[in-house]
Amino acid sequence: MKNPVNPATSTAGTGPETEQTQALRSLGRGLKGSGRPARSEQGGSTRAQAMFQGRLHGALAHRLGVDILNGVYPSGDILPNEIESSSTLDISRSAYREAIRILAAKGMVESRPKTGTRVTERARWNLLDPEVLGWMFETEPQPGFIKALFELRLITEPAAAELAAQRRSDADVERMREALVVMKHETLQTEAGRRADLDFHHTLIHATGNEALASLSSSIEAAVSWTTRYKARRNALARDPIPDHERVFEAIARQDAGAARWCMESLVRMAHEDTMRILNV
């Protein structure tokens, strides 16, 4: 556990608070919404309280995950134990345990008898988990990580476009066409436009008929979604990316596999350049 950063800050009879305890108290205040159910007079939980505790573990996992990504809890740190955490946060121990299970499934923490719950090294984190990607973009992601996402897209999406051109069905083509119509009307600055963009990319991957590639679709789509949101988070996009999507669509519709690969590679490279231009602003 970290050393205290403010010896003057203490709780009665317990000595100075550590950074972790202060972070937990701050986390607890954030999780206690105005609509939180009150406990029953007998000290037990009402049904509403039980439902709240059941939902709370997801919110707690989200907040702890973002804090880990932000370095509040660096790799190697031991998180406060279950009893301390549930007391400080005023949540049930089962809710805290479930939040830790969520983080462990994503490779971000590991629990061992007698040593507690430790934040693992970054290399073990499942950074392509769609939820973790979302947490990552709640922070300010490093340029190197954004570059890595675009490299992943360059490895997978041009090949997917090539396969889609060879194997797509008429239904795939129509669904991609409909997604493009919405994207053009709504633009990628809107939630509806971004959903249509995801539908376009999802349909493209589905059209490959490749089961193994389809298993990566949620990660690829999350990478598309969050990099698009990141580009649009400040101002209108400096360059309209819809024509890039139209060229990919047209190549797939006419079953030109080589052109589909080239157009998708161009789309991803241009999107990367747009994003890096924003990082340099």
Image (tube, rainbow, N blue to C red):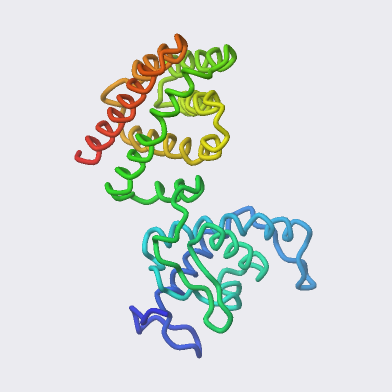
Asked if residue 99 is positioned above or below residue 234 in the image, the reply reads below
Residue 275: name its quadrant. Answer: top left
Residue 142 image position (x, y, % from top left): 29, 50
Asked if residue 260 is positioned above or below residue 233 in the image, the reply reads above
Q: Which residue is drawn at 49% across and 17% down?
A: 182
Q: Residue at x 32, y 22 (%)?
A: 262
Residue 249 image position (x, y, % from top left): 43, 15
Pick the residue in front: 53 or 241: 241
Pick the residue in front: 126 or 230: 126
Would residue 174 appear left or right of 264 to someone viewing this image? right
Residue 272: name its quadrant. Answer: top left
Pick the residue in front: 72 or 168: 168
| Viewport quadrant of the C terminus | top left
Would residue 239 appear left or right of 64 to someone viewing this image? left
Tell how many labels. Answer: 0
| Viewport quadrant of the N terminus | bottom left
Pick the residue in front: 142 or 43: 142
Q: Which residue is drawn at 41% across and 68% down?
A: 73
Residue 141 image position (x, y, % from top left): 33, 49
Residue 87 image position (x, y, % from top left): 60, 75
